């Protein structure tokens, strides 16, 4: 049981009932999860795991590394929190580069449910050829379609695309190793959204959360660029 604040080292002076409640909460924690309490003296947050205080950012820095934020909690997916929301309006065409499979059909159905017109292709060459003539608002790519993502011709094509065009495309990567809605992972792979393959059954809900967030973040910027005649 923690006795002193790891930040200011002041004794926490928890009452017996508070200690009992804290022990109960820690015992119920799932592996890897944490709870947070606040020091009454310095007011800083104290993160606790099942095995005691979690490492503070300062301690992590002293240890010689920077710990990235954890993937987001996806418990809300199973509740269907966004299930009843209205579909995204005025969304044009989407390109799906994915092998013919039941999973691709789920992707198509989910994207059509939020208003996309969906075109599916099965090769990188065909996808790049289609993109020469159509301004897709969304592109979905299975990360293992061409083996390693690092060696993927299509992913390289997306990364090297001129920003005047790329900024208008919502690029989604799907794969077994991704963590759904993990923005840091999306940023590291030059995508706008990453989705774990195991979460495709919730793909429509994920889109209903991710698309409005994307439009809220980038919509004003794109409108201003349009007003300045820059596309």
Image (cartoon, rainbow, N blue to C red):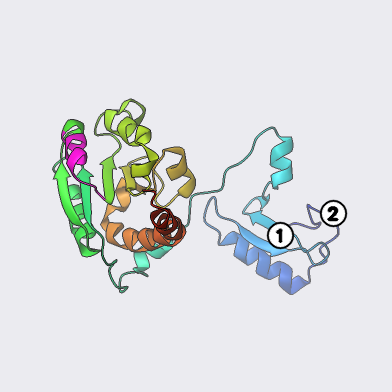
| Labels 1 and 2 touching (C-beta < 8 A) | no
Q: Position of residue 122 (x, y in %)?
A: 15, 37
| Farthest-out residue, left | 100
Q: Residue at x 73, y 44 (%)?
A: 58
Say what secondary structure mark 2 lies in.
loop
For residue 212, above or below residue 51: below
Circle 2 is placed at which residue position?
9
Quadrant in which residue 165 is drawn: top left
In the displayed structure, 92 sits above or below 133; it is: below
Identify the residue at image location x=62%, y=66%: 24
Disc ID at residue 191 = none
Task: Say whether residue 104 is magenta.
Answer: no
Report the magenta stretch's main SS.
Answer: helix
Residue 59 appears at what percent x and percent y? 73, 42
How many residues crowd around disc 1 within 10 Å: few (fewer than 14), some, or many (20 or more)? some
Toward the viewer: 225 or 156? 225
For the N terminus, the image quarter is: bottom right
Is residue 124 rendered to the left or right of residue 14? left
Taking 29 as reference, is 194 left or right? left
| Magenta stretch in the rendered image | 126-136
Where's residue 210, x and y in %? 38, 58
Q: Can the viewer see residue 101? A: no
Residue at 25% across / 29% down in the picture? 146
């Amino acid at each position: 049981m923690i006795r002193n604040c790891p930040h200011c080292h002041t004794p926490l002076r928890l009452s017996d009932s508070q200690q009992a409640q804290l022990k109960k909460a820690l015992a119920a924690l799932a592996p890897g999860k944490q709870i947070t309490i606040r020091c009454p003296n310095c007011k800083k947050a104290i993160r606790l795991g099942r095995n005691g205080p979690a490492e503070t950012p300062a301690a992590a820095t002293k240890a010689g590394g920077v710990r990235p934020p954890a993937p987001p909690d996806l418990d809300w997916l199973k509740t269907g929190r966004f299930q009843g929301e209205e579909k995204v309006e005025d969304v044009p065409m989407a390109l799906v580069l994915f092998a013919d499979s039941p999973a691709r059909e789920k992707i198509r159905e989910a994207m059509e449910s939020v208003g996309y017109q969906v075109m599916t292709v099965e090769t990188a060459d065909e996808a790049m050829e289609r993109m020469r003539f159509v301004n897709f608002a969304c592109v979905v790519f299975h990360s293992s379609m061409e083996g390693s993502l690092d060696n993927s011709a299509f992913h390289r094509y997306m990364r090297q695309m001129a920003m005047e065009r790329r900024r208008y495309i919502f690029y989604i990567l799907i794969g077994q190793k991704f963590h759904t809605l993990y923005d840091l992972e999306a940023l590291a792979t030059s995508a706008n959204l990453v989705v774990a393959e195991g979460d495709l059954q919730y793909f429509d809900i994920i889109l209903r959360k991710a698309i409005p967030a994307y439009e809220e973040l980038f919509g004003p910027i794109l409108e201003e660029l349009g007003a300045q005649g820059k596309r």
